[in-house]
Image: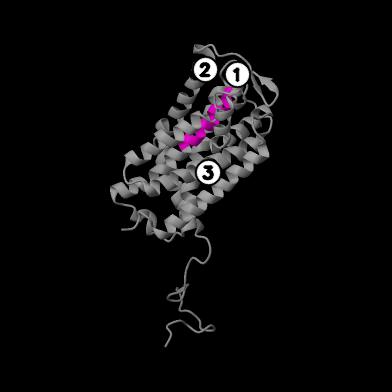
Amino acid sequence: MSSQPSPGRQLPSGVRHAPGEPVIRNVNWGGLKTLYVKEVRRFFKVQLQTIWAPAITTLLFLVIFTVASGARTPVRVGGEVVPFADFVAPGLIVMGMLQNAFANASFSLLVGKIQGNIVDYLQPPLSTAELLAALTGAAVTRAFLVGCAVFLAMSLWPGVHVTPRHPGAVLWFGLLGSAFLALVGVLTSIWAEKFDHAAAVTNFVVAPLTLLSGTFYSVDHLAPAFRAFSHVNPFFYVISGFRYGFLGTADSPVLTGSVVILALDVALATLCYVLLRRGWKLKS
């Protein structure tokens, strides 16, 4: 006989669910929020290292390129001439956001595998999508906190104008770019077996592609071969679109960049979901 009560049977007092009946039927919002808050608190406990230090480092880039090196020549972007400091500031803001989104997401599962407590991520009643959403959401949160800190510092720096002309574009490309690097970080965290692996991705993939994406220069000034390389670099579209939100002009079509990064986000999210669901390199 089935142990399940008949449809019309009254459950005993104090019993809310029949044996074997799933308690969480749709989205486990409580569990999703708990993991997200746990990930945010993890990096916020050391906020001097995870938020304010990257902001100071990014500001130093601005000081070096605008003061120490004397680079004050205006830059032509999309047919419009803008001061060099105003040109480089948005790129530095989003560069800091991208690098810290990756750093946060590439740490979570990796440290669990190294310390042997990866079960803390896999055992709770969270679906694969909820686990991925919490890890990505926490990384995006750190990215936006770093971006706000850098923006605040640059808004107080003399000679730099960082007032957004299109706030929607700033938020949209900030979100797309942060999610893109967060998903790359989750993928790295799944694949990596030690911190050296994650550091290799940072040093040989993320950092070079970020620095060669038009952060400090307009790609229109490059030779054709280097210009072609820039247009296949996804970081270029993030930085160009984010810069458009501040300057109102960009090195590339904003709509094209939005579609490219959105497609990459969907592809990476799908790949991370499949790997997490299969437990690749996570379950022994």
**Label 2–label 1 contact, CB within 8 A:** yes
Image quadrant in which the N terminus is located:
bottom left
**Label 3–label 1 contact, CB within 8 A:** no
Q: Which residue is mark 2?
A: 65
Q: Which residue is mark 3?
A: 179
Which residue lies most toward the bottom here? 1
Q: Of label 3 and label 1, which has the lower sequence position?
A: 1
Which residue is at a point 35% across and 41% down the rendered structure image? 197
Residue closest to the eye, 215 or 164: 215
Q: Of label 2 and label 3, which has the lower sequence position?
A: 2
Which residue is at a point 51% across and 31% down the rendered structure image? 95
C-alpha distance separating marks 2 and 3: 28 Å
Picture quadrant of residue 52:
top left
For the stretch drawn in magenta, what is the main secondary structure?
A: helix
Amino acid at dot 2: Phe
Amino acid at dot 3: Ala
Q: Which residue is mark 1?
A: 84
Picture quadrant of residue 278:
bottom left
C-alpha distance separating marks 2 and 1: 9 Å
User: Where is residue 5 drawn, in percent x and y?
Assistant: 47, 82
Q: Of label 2 and label 1, which has the lower sequence position?
A: 2
